């Protein structure tokens, strides 16, 4: 009877830890630096599906770093050195600033502009378009290379991995691992990553959908403004994070 009671308490405690891990993962996705980075990444996809893929790639990179770090620390029985998180935060800041600059350069290279014309007996009106988005109006087309798409997805994974080392994520994710069994610690990390991936997929999917809507017709100007705003925010926040970390 005492054994059954002890087992029941252990199971309840384990379920509680895993529930906490999932909840922390859901919330952790909305840290300011995570949201800013994903805003830049997802709005460049112009599609909900591609946005979700970017979010899942980010979460995969984040989760892999936590799992590797967790396994190493569990075997060593030690906590993550504080200096690792500090330098990782500085790295995140530099990467976010660079990401914002890349988007600014990309926007300039597209040379977006308003195209005024008349057709079908309508009054003169304008559409916003870019050289890249409206190839027909320039006499030739441009096809996005598959390698470029893969490179952007790989970039999301790498940024997620860097975020995995930065800030409070390792402390939140690895705290139970030091106090309980290695198996529970590993399960905690996996469930934490699942919660994180779910939140980030929803966020990035919504951002990608919004970008896709803004990219249609005359509303393409709205996408340019949105991407410019997120790029500027990423540069400012990245520099601030790199300096103050």
Image (cartoon, rainbow, N blue to C red):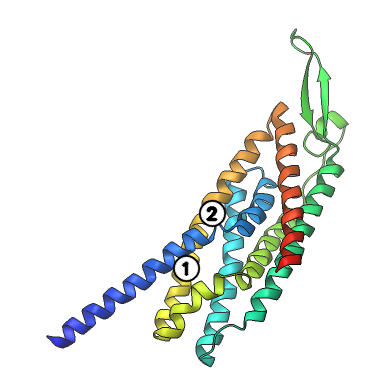
How many numbered dots are placed on residues in this image?
Answer: 2
Location of residue 204 with respect to 15 vertically, above or below? above
Q: CA distance from mark 1 to mark 2?
A: 14 Å
Q: In the displayed structure, would residue 82 be above or below residue 147? A: below
- Residue 134 or 166: which is nearer the viewer? 166
Residue 119's x, y, as percent?
77, 13
In the image, taking residue 215 as reference, residue 67 lies left or right, namely left
**Element carrying mark 1:** helix
Figure quadrant of residue 6: bottom left
The residue lying furthest to the front in this view is: 244
Q: In the shown orientation, is residue 174 left or right of residue 36?
A: left
Q: Position of residue 124 (x, y in %)?
A: 79, 12
Residue farthest along the left direction in this orientation: 1
Specify whether 98 is left or right of 180. Answer: right
Q: Residues within 10 Å of mark 2 (few under 14, many from 20)?
A: many
Q: The residue tagged with tag 2: helix, strand or loop?
A: helix
Q: Residue furthest bottom?
A: 76
Tag shown at residue 224: none
Residue 201 image label: 2
In front of the other: 131 or 22: 22
Q: Which residue is mark 1?
A: 192
Residue drawn at (84%, 36%), measured in percent from left and top?
131
Residue 69 horizontal/vertical position (percent): 57, 80
User: Which residue is pictured at 23% across the width and 82% down the height?
Assistant: 7
Location of residue 5 in the rendering, given as x and y in whole percent from the top left corner: 17, 82
């Amino acid at each position: 009877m005492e054994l059954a009671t002890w087992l029941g308490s252990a199971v309840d405690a384990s379920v509680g830890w895993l529930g906490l891990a999932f909840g922390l993962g859901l919330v952790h996705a909305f840290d300011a630096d995570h949201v800013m980075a994903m805003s830049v990444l997802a709005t460049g996809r112009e599609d909900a599906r591609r946005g979700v893929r970017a979010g899942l790639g980010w979460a995969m990179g984040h989760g892999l770093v936590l799992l590797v770090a967790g396994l190493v620390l569990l075997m060593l029985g030690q906590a993550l050195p504080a200096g690792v998180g500090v330098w990782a935060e500085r790295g995140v800041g530099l990467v976010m600033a660079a990401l914002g600059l890349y988007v600014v350069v990309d926007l300039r290279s597209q040379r977006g502009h308003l195209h005024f014309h008349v057709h079908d007996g309508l009054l003169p009106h304008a559409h916003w378009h870019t050289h890249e988005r409206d190839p027909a109006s320039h006499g030739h087309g441009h096809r996005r290379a598959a390698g470029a798409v893969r490179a952007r997805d790989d970039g999301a994974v790498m940024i997620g991995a860097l975020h995995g080392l930065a800030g409070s994520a390792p402390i939140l994710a690895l705290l139970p691992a030091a106090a309980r069994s290695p198996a529970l610690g590993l399960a905690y990390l996996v469930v934490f990553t699942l919660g994180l991936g779910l939140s980030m997929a929803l966020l990035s999917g919504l951002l990608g959908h919004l970008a896709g809507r803004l990219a249609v017709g005359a509303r393409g100007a709205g996408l340019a403004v949105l991407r410019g705003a997120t790029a500027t925010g990423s540069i400012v926040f990245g520099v601030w994070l790199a300096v103050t970390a």
